[in-house]
Image (cartoon, rainbow, N blue to C red):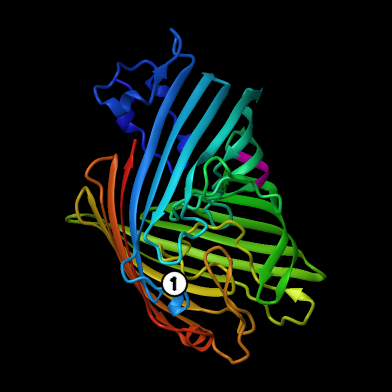
Amino acid sequence: MGAQASDVSFKALRYEEDYSSLRDEPPSRAFADRLKFIPLDATGGAWLTLGGESRSRYEYFSHAQWGAGPQDEDGYFLQRTMLHADWHLAEAVRVFVQLKSGLEAGRNGGPRSTDEDRFDLNQAFVDARWPVTADATLTLRVGRQEIALGSSRLVSTREAPNVHLTFDGARVFLQHKGWRIDALAVRPAQTRPGSFDDSPDRTQKLWGLYAVTPFPKWSGANLDIYYLGYERDSGRFAQGAAHENRQTFGSRLWGKRGDWDYNGEAVLQFGRFGGDQIHAWLLSLDTSYTFSAATGKSRLGVRGGIASGDRDPDDGELNTYNGLFPRGAYFHESGLIGPANIIAVDAFVTVQASAAVNLSADCNFFWRQSEHDGVYGSAVNLVRPALTTPGRSLGTQPSVRVEWRPTRHWLVAATFARFYAGEVIRGSGPGRDVDYVSTWTTCTF
């Protein structure tokens, strides 16, 4: 017997799921699995895959934005529904279409920009693939698409928020032996709350190369090397607002060695911000150890990172690191702090309590990298201005999370976090401690 649909795990990028191995398998009795390979001709050379997701989520903040945001005693609800069709016309040509609906109800102050998009195209692209040599293939992708590069520090799908981030443009993939090289030229799609009203954001553009290969000197290791160019009409930092043209060069070493896994990344950024030079950087390292216990596997680890902040607003340089399009819950689902002018250390533990239940707890510690720069949110948005008084401590955030997966199609999860505001938050405006509660149920097929 070959693979069954239930053997193929759902991917964060749904277009990466490949059910072609089911071509010669008898139909499954499960209706959802029958949707994964629907032959469109007698040989199965053309086929259709259908899938989707529905997520219902409740969120509550006490003292939102440390007391500066809209205050809400009851919380609010978010609903996300996505349906996709993956049509393989032949081995070399495919069309992928995904619809989305994101709704918000009950939030004091109304929906945020990532909360609501009533009905629209999330993705709609065409792939064409050609063999270049016996061991190399080239794929051209054109249209609207989700993009996640590496560990999603710079380009991500924005999974945690209600509405995913997508891009309009073109990508070219070259696969040669152990190498995969991705060239892209895209614009982010603007999320608007209406129906079929999303369009390319003409004020921003992203281009570059991203290469991944096994690291030849170290068993189990992989190496990412990349360049990303980014331009927007008006970037805003504590230093001010101006036209931004930023070049990002980075490298990532990641993998697994025995019971240890690791993920280290270094990034340098150069360019122009109005009439000023850009010189910024990021260093990060995640490592953890997985060990077996009587009830299952547990994982203990630490994450740490430093993203540069501006040293002096009047020195002709901008030193604030820009995470471009980072994952929406960069440090936590609460999304209070983002990857700019930050020193962050997170100690965490996860426990597999049973085959279906996972428990996790962690504690984040946050400081400003530069005392002369402001505080930034998860979208690299300025949430607190630069201070003239000294201080680095932003706060401490312990959190817990529980996940229950009764089947491969269902996830029920909840998280609680408390952010203890540090001296910088307390000294730059409302500085209340924040409680955050979120619970959600996701059905995936």
Identify the residue at the far left of this view: 294
Q: Residue at x 63, y 41 (%)?
A: 168
Q: Residue at x 35, y 43 (%)?
A: 54
Identify the residue at the far bottom of this view: 389
Q: Return the x and y of residue 378 as percentages of the image width and height.
A: 52, 65
Q: Return the x and y of residue 47 as percentages of the image width and height.
A: 45, 19
Figure check: 21 above or below 430: above
Q: Is residue 65 magenta?
A: no
The magenta region covers: 180-187
The one nearer the camera, 367 or 240, is: 240
The one nearer the camera, 299 or 14, is: 14
Quadrant containing the N terminus is top left
Q: Return the x and y of residue 56 as percentages of the image width and height.
A: 33, 50
Residue holding disc 1: 70
Q: Is residue 182 magenta?
A: yes
Figure check: 308 above or below 43: below
The one nearer the camera, 416 or 200, is: 200
Instruction: Name the side, left or right, on which 243 lies relative to 439.
Output: right
